[in-house]
């Protein structure tokens, strides 16, 4: 079991530090909203990944993979949600250009649940995450081990690695907050993250599998 966990941890670490949608979401939250919302986003992403890991462990992901209709519904819903978020972030970047610092400071403060939910839904509505867990987790379940318990353990290991990586990103953003606090930088981060989400959403929507 120890060898399986360590091997999976190595694979998970390599995947975690690969730039992608999750990293972009957390970085954007750290730059535009602050440390608290960024950690809430990271926790939401972790919860979504853990849910997929549990689904893969009990075979729900396999059922989804076997059902083309179910997969298509989830794929379209995920694509629509990512496109929606991307458009909102790009619109926010455009609004920042014509808003004074006082007006920007007076915006409503994001709540824990709103930022947690954004991270959670982004991962939960991404069938590619489920496909990854479905393909990888069974390969690391030792013969004779309980599939559910092992699958949850492996997903939790991946979650912890992700949270450590996100914490490093958030702390780095905080260390550079003097530069990142500039409105031009925030606009760039909003626009860049929105473009990434939009691209992921369009690619997912056009994907046939």
Image (spheres, rainbow, N blue to C red):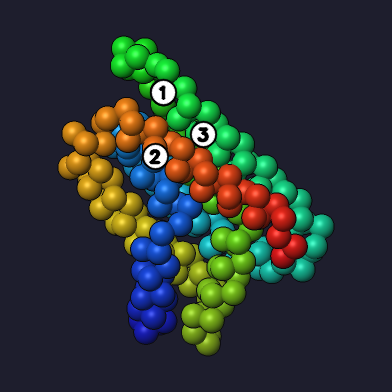
Q: Quadrant of the N terminus?
A: bottom left
Q: Residue at x 42, y 67 (%)?
A: 15
- Residue 108 in the figure: left or right of residue 65: left
**Circle 3 Cα neighbour tier, 10 Å, few/some/many (<14 / 14–19 / ≥20):** many
Q: Mark 2 vs mark 3: which is more N-terminal?
A: 3
Q: Nearer the viewer, residue 144 or 134?
A: 134
Query: In this picture, is 101 found above or below 65?
Result: above
x, y percentage for residue 175?
17, 42
Query: In this picture, is 187 found above or below 157?
Result: above
- Residue 62 in the figure: left or right of residue 33: right
x, y percentage for residue 187?
39, 32
**Closer to viewer: mark 3 or mark 1:** 1
Query: In this picture, is 200 found above or below 53?
Result: above
Residues under labels 3 and 1: Cα distance?
A: 11 Å
The image quadrant of residue 30 is top left
x, y percentage for residue 70?
77, 56
Residues under labels 2 and 1: Cα distance?
A: 13 Å
Q: Residue at x 60, y 70 (%)?
A: 134
- Tag 3 residue: 90
Q: Are marks 2 and 3 in contact (CB under 8 Å)?
A: no
- Tag 2 residue: 189
- Residue 180 in the figure: left or right of residue 26: left
Residues under labels 2 and 3: Cα distance?
A: 9 Å
Q: Nearer the viewer, residue 180 or 171?
A: 180
Q: Nearer the viewer, residue 200 or 1?
A: 200
x, y percentage for residue 128?
60, 61
């Amino acid at each position: 079991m120890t060898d399986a966990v360590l091997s999976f941890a190595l694979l998970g670490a390599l995947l975690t530090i690969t730039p992608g949608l999750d990293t972009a979401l957390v970085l954007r939250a750290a730059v535009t909203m602050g440390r608290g919302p960024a950690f809430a986003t990271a926790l939401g992403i972790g919860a979504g990944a853990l849910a997929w890991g549990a689904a893969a462990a009990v075979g729900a992901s396999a059922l989804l993979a076997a059902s083309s209709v179910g997969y298509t519904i989830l794929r379209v819903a995920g694509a629509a949600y990512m496109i929606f978020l991307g458009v909102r972030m790009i619109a926010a970047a455009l609004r920042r250009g014509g808003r004074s610092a006082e007006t920007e400071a007076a915006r409503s403060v994001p709540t824990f649940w709103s930022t947690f939910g954004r991270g959670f839904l982004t991962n939960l509505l991404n069938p590619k995450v489920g496909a990854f867990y479905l393909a990888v987790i069974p390969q690391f379940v030792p013969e004779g081990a309980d599939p559910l318990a092992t699958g949850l353990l492996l997903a939790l290991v991946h979650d912890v690695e992700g949270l450590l990586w996100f914490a490093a990103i958030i702390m780095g953003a905080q260390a550079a907050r003097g530069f990142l606090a500039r409105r031009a930088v925030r606009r760039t981060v909003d626009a860049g993250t929105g473009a990434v989400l939009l691209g992921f959403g369009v690619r997912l929507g056009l994907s046939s599998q």
